[in-house]
Image (cartoon, helix red, strand yellow):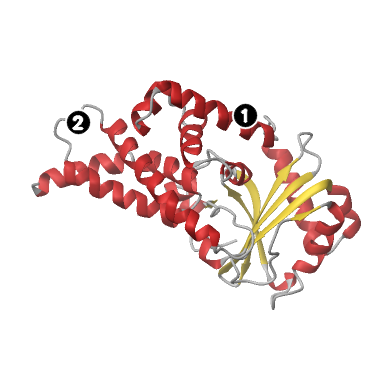
Amino acid sequence: MSESSVDEATDVFMDHRELLFGLVYNMLGSVADTEDVLQETWLSWTGRGTAGVANPRAYLVRIAVNHALQRRTSVARRRETYVGPWLPEPLVADEADAGDPAVRTESVSLAMLVVLESLTPLERAVFVLNEVFGYAHTEIADIIDRSPAAVRQLAHRARDHVHARRPRYRAHPRVRREATERFVRAALGGDIAELMEILAPDVTVWTDGGGVRKPAGLRPVHGRDKAVRLITGYSTRGGVRHHELDLRYRRVNGDDAAVLFDGESPYAVMVMDLTPQGDQVCGIYIVTNPDKLTHVHKEEA
């Protein structure tokens, strides 16, 4: 394949890279694995070339999705030996990174990605393609090499499962921001009364430290009383106290969230999930595993 042909194929690939990143990331929940899949997709694409490809977008999506499905096997193996709860790698946006597709993919919230982890790889692929990116069942059938009837069945199962665990609502951004700030003030200030008021009775807290950073629970914590005990003790253990941390509010996977920095290094990303009424926090996702925060950068205040 000539150098000019490789350059042409690369240009076409780069034109579609943001779409491919979004598809693959929402299937895998890992930036590192997504980048690996995109590299495999680029190699497959440039090796084949653009000649005779009537619809490069469709062709690239097919390649990327199928590479992602293959990658799910290795992701699942790593999950089996992962220490503590596993959370998706958060996509943290700031002004400096506004043009980077790795932080501008906002289609699926962190809470939704956690739900998608419980789907089979094919169900998840169909859900992401159909519900998030708007692909028709017939188009998806071509992408994953299944019949349209099989795709409809996969879509039905995935949709029922997701909607059973995720209500069909999305709180107004202003409500999310206010609830996030209120929770963070209470959590870092150790205000137990305020925490008891803002946390829903059945709140669940996930802390993903990957066995690297302490403290982090080995399993999710359920219930308001246990959550309050965990949160009030969280910032005073593990060698870094809350008054030494720098708090910044950022958008994480499209939602307002809190990011804590220890000096210039990211220490934790905290994402809150709200009740349907938007007045209480029903889920808290705390990612402290340094390996999942490598894409998080501090900017000037």
Label 1 sits on residue: 160
Percent x, y for residue 129? 45, 32
Looking at the rendered structure, the number of numbered marks drawn on it comes to 2
Task: Quadrant for the C terminus, please.
Answer: bottom right
Q: Residue at x 40, y 50 (%)?
A: 71
Label 2 sits on residue: 53
Q: Are marks 2 and 1 in contact (CB under 8 Å)?
A: no
Specify few, some or many for label 1: CA neighbours under 10 Å numbering under 14, 14-19, or 20 or more: few
Foreground: 79 or 267?
A: 79
Query: Going by the picture, which residue comes out furthest to the bottom?
Result: 239
What is the three-letter code of the residue carrying label 1?
A: Asp
Tell me where residue 237 sits by quadrant. bottom right
- The local secondary structure at tag 2 comes to loop
Left or right: where does residue 82 sit relative to residue 186? left
Left or right: where does residue 81 sit relative to residue 168? left
Camera sees residue 299: no
Query: Going by the picture, which residue comes out furthest to the left?
Result: 2
Left or right: where does residue 243 sit relative to residue 288? right
Percent x, y for residue 257? 65, 51
Q: Which mark is residue 2?
A: none
Percent x, y for residue 245? 68, 69
Tell me where residue 19 sits by quadrant. top left
- The local secondary structure at tag 1 comes to helix
